[in-house]
Amino acid sequence: MAGPGGDSQAIIPVTSETMSEPLRAYQAFVTADLVTLQASADTLRADVDAGDLEAARRDWLTAHLDYERLGAAYGTFGDFDAAINGRPDGLPGGVHDPEFSGFHRIEYGLWHGESAESLKAPAAKLSTDVAELGKAFPTQEFDPNDLALRTHEILENTLQFQLTGSADQGSGTALATASANVDGTRELLTVISPVLRTRAPATLETAGRRLDAFGTLLRQVANPQGTWIAPGGLALADRRKLNGSLGALLETLASIPDVLEIRSTG
């Protein structure tokens, strides 16, 4: 039976060996981008230490998007993800809970009038947590099935948290995060494309086309003048266009984990 991308041929089995090269390629991508993230986090910390909150707001977004582009690695990052990019949801004290840390803690402070002095400790902790993640990542295990799974999950989370703005802590940059999520998904499609092309070429083609269409639409309606518009500031027609475009993309991406699921050959 044909899937969302129109493929109808029998699926060639996928093994751990099949996914070994895509996995190595993705790990290399993450390793390199963690260096970029560290530099961005250190710049943010320096801004806060210098008391330059205008620069900190600008550099916060740069660093946060560097993290969001890592996409599939979230599951591997484990507790580091909660420390670096966790939301206050479920914490007893909400945004004032002492366990609330990372990008969204700093975001809350930067856009809610907190002083530079009050943000020094969160900024230092973020920089340290990113450094610890960089040290730990080479030894962390990564399930090869996650490469395919995250091609769908990243943008599923985007639909839930970014297009609604529910993860935003005051910066109004949720749709910039959505654009970074598009970049992360594109990287995943790139590394799995040699395997997917031999098994579901129409799905790969449709996914790439719909991903490009959603990314282009996102920038057209949410960043028309080079400044990101918060989801709540979009016209209703534009919100509907984004939801429709992402919905069609997710429909295509949903079949990829099944196509590339690693099954026992024994």
Image: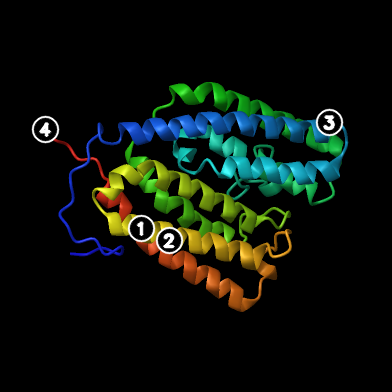
Residue matched to label 3: 49
Whole-percent x, y for residue 21 in the image: 33, 32
Residue 254 visible in this rendered orientation of the protein:
no
Whether pointer 2 and pointer 1 mark residues with C-beta atoms closer than 8 Å, the reply is yes
Instruction: Kindly identify which residue carries mark 2.
Output: 209
Q: Tell me which numbered mark, 4 or 1, is placed earlier along the sequence.
A: 1
For the C terminus, the quadrant is top left
Q: Residue at x 86, y 35 (%)?
A: 117
Q: Residue at x 82, y 37 (%)?
A: 118
**Residue type (three-letter) at the residue carrying disc 1:** Glu
Residue holding disc 1: 205
Foreground tag (4 vs 1): 1
Question: N-terminal of the two: label 3 or label 2?
Answer: 3
Pick the front one: 194 or 54: 194
Q: Residue furthest bottom?
A: 237
Using the rendered image of the protein, determine whether residue 98 is visible from the camera's viewpoint. Answer: yes
Relative vertical location of residue 94 with respect to residue 227 in this rendering, above or below? above
**Picture coordinates of residue 28, whole percent (x, y):** 46, 30
On screen, residue 256 versus residue 238, left or right, reads left
Q: Residues within 10 Å of mark 3 (few under 14, many from 20)?
A: some
* Alpha-carbon span between mark 2 and mark 4: 37 Å
Residue at the image position 33 percent from the left and 36 percent from the top: 144
The residues bearing labels 2 and 1 have C-alpha atoms spaced at a distance of 6 Å
Q: Which residue is mark 4?
A: 266
Tell me whether circle 4 and circle 1 mark residues in contact (CB < 8 Å): no
Type of amino acid at the residue the image marks with label 2: Arg
In three-dimensional space, the C-alpha distance between marks 3 and 1, rounded to whole angstroms, equals 47 Å
The tag earlier along the polypeptide, 3 or 1, is 3
Residue 219 in percent (x, y) is at 62, 62
Bin the neighbour count of mark 1 within 10 Å (Cα to Cα): few under 14, some 14-19, many 20 and up: some
Q: Are marks 3 and 1 in contact (CB under 8 Å)?
A: no
